[in-house]
Amino acid sequence: MIGHKRYGSREGGVEVVVTELARRMAALGHVVTCYDRSGADVMTGDQTGACERMVDGVRVVPVRTIDKKGLAALSSSFFATLAAIRQRPDVIHYHAEGPCVPLSLARWAGIRTVATIHGLDWQRAKWGKLASTYIKMGEKTAANKADGLIVLSKAAESYFKDEYSRDATVIPNGIDGKISCPADFITSKWGLSTGSYILFLGRLVPEKRPELLIEAFKGLDTDKKLVIAGGGSDTSEYESQLHYLAAGDERIAFTGFVSGGPLAELYSNCFAYVLPSDVEGMPMSLLEAMAYGCCCVTSDIPECADVLAGNGVTFEKGSAESLRTALCALLADTGRVGLLGAAARMHVEEAYTWDSVVERTLAVYEGEAR
């Protein structure tokens, strides 16, 4: 499997999917190799992992990476493809659009290729014109050259049909069941208690629109706090703008990246989780929030609304006023908050299982669609 590197101190959605697929396929008896950018192990997060290793039955192979902005993803996916071709596997599975650029090499070598498009990455605001062009090249390669094409949503399926006349198989991400835990660390660290805060959790990048949430929140008459959990991704200037926008409102707290126990506590004890994104693939943080039984509020883009399936609240994309109205309604009806959280948990436990994801992905490997 060939995909992206980790983001900072927290795995991104691509890394979570690759890790779950690899481990579970290996447990079923398949021989699985993950090719990983030098210096950071996608399976373990080991920043010194520059040597080959076995992790949970998966062979993890670091590949050469030119560690310069704009060249890291390009070089690592190219060298990973060459390494994979030498091994002559039955299938090479590419994850995300950028890494798909060298997919044609594997096809020319006579190896079956599968590409999972986790989102239309060229649309993300953090990329400049050159990077966006390169990523779009990966999308075109996947659409025109991959033997199997996997997307995460019906909206993405329609996009590839309309743009490239290419059929794709919809296989959403999975999520493990979560057990809620009491506020402990977050109380001592940030003074947060159960139900005392609204939560945004994700990378602080423009397409996720945290500034929209800050704007909407500042207009609320509430003693609840707003917790912005996450860090930037090549967008430190944007992160600074968020701090400037929040200045003067002591109810707004930035935690930086969180993981492990503190992350579980933040999900478990929030009043509501908010994801105001303009662009998403299939947000793992939304699935996690639902699995913890959070009342979830998202923009009305299909990639979020389809996941909620009515078990949460949506607002008009890009509208701070619409978001403020949605939050006001929840603050006025706390009983509804609990009901929506319980419904969200039940929905993801039934609809988004990793066993189903693995089974359907293996079917694509075999040239079938389920």
Image (cartoon, rainbow, N blue to C red):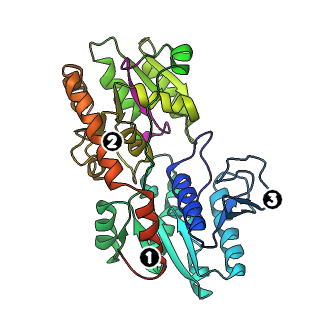
Please report whichever mark, 2 or 1, sits nearer to the chain's N-terminal start. 2
* Residue indicated by mark 3: 51
Residue displayed at 25% across by 28% down? 337
Residue 312 location in percent, x, y?
25, 39
Dividing the image into 4 quarters, which one contains the C terminus?
Answer: bottom left
Between 362 and 103, the one nearer to me in the picture: 362
171 on left or right of 56 = left
**Residue 243 visible in the snapshot:** yes
Q: What is the span of residues highlighted in magenta in the rendered image?
A: 194-207
Residue 196 lies within the magenta run: yes
From mark 1 to mark 3, how far is it between C-alphas?
31 Å
Name the residue tied to disc 1: 364
Residue 66 percent location from the top left of the image? 74, 58
Depth order, front residue of 11/78: 11
Residue shown at the point (32%, 55%) measured from the top left: 351
Sequence-earlier tag: 1 or 3:
3
Give percent across and percent down for residue 329: 19, 25
Q: Amino acid at mark 1?
A: Val
Q: Residue at x 43, y 76 (%)?
A: 363
- Residue 12 among those drawn in magenta: no
Query: Which residue occupies 53% across, 52% down?
Result: 16
Q: Which mark is residue 345?
A: 2
**Could you tell me which secondary element the residue under label 1 belongs to?**
helix
Q: Is 110 displayed left or right of 268 in the figure?
A: right
